[in-house]
Each structure stands twice: as C-alpha cells, then as structure tokens.
Image (cartoon, rainbow, N blue to C red):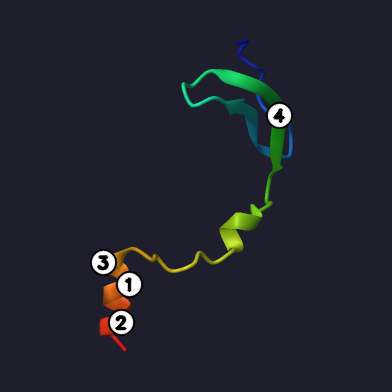
Amino acid sequence: MEPTARGKPGVKMTLRVYRMARDGTVTEDRGTVQVPEGEVPPTALDPLPPCACPVHRAGREAGR
C-alpha cells in the first residue's frame, strides 16, 4: 500500500473500508470514506441500549 500525501483540507479522517473473511483475508475493497472536519458520526449521538448481561441486569433490578 502506498503512503498518501498529507490529508485534504476540511477532511478530519480518511478510512479504507474492506470486507474480510473470518480468516482475515480481504474479500472486497469497499473504497474510501472521508469524515469531514467538524462532523460528528451519527452513532456518537445515538444512546446505546443498557447492557443485558446477567451481572448488569441484576444490578438494575436490585435498584428498583
């Protein structure tokens, strides 16, 4: 893989996206995704559901 020149103005991060098999081999090159500067990824704003593992589930029930 060639090293790239310094990033484009206004681009905060550039990611290469690949689809991979379980053994780690690349099966598909999905291209490049660029995250503009100042943009917040939508997942950063979405609340995550509470953990449903037995330890955390028991802790929530005890506090009721």
The label on residue 57 is: 1
The image position of residue 20, as x and y in percent, is 56, 26
Question: From mark 2 to mark 4, how far is it between C-alphas?
Answer: 45 Å
Q: Which residue is mark 4?
A: 32
Whether residue 26 sits left or right of residue 9 in the image: it is: left
Badge 4 or badge 1: first in the primary sequence: 4
Q: Is residue 56 left or right of residue 23?
A: left
Crowd class of label 1 (few under 14; some 14 to 19; many from 20; radius 10 Å): few
> Which residue, given by chain and number where applicable, does mark 2 sit on?
61
Q: Secondary structure at mark 1?
A: helix
Q: Which residue: 46% across, 21% down? A: 23
Q: Are marks 2 and 1 in contact (CB under 8 Å)?
A: yes
How many neighbours does mark 2 have within 10 angstroms: few (below 14), some (14-19), or many (20 or more)? few
Of the image marks 3 and 4, the number of the one nearer the N terminus: 4
Q: Position of residue 18 (x, y in %)?
A: 62, 27
Residue 55 numbered mark, or none: 3
Give the amino acid type for the residue marked by disc 3 in the picture.
Val
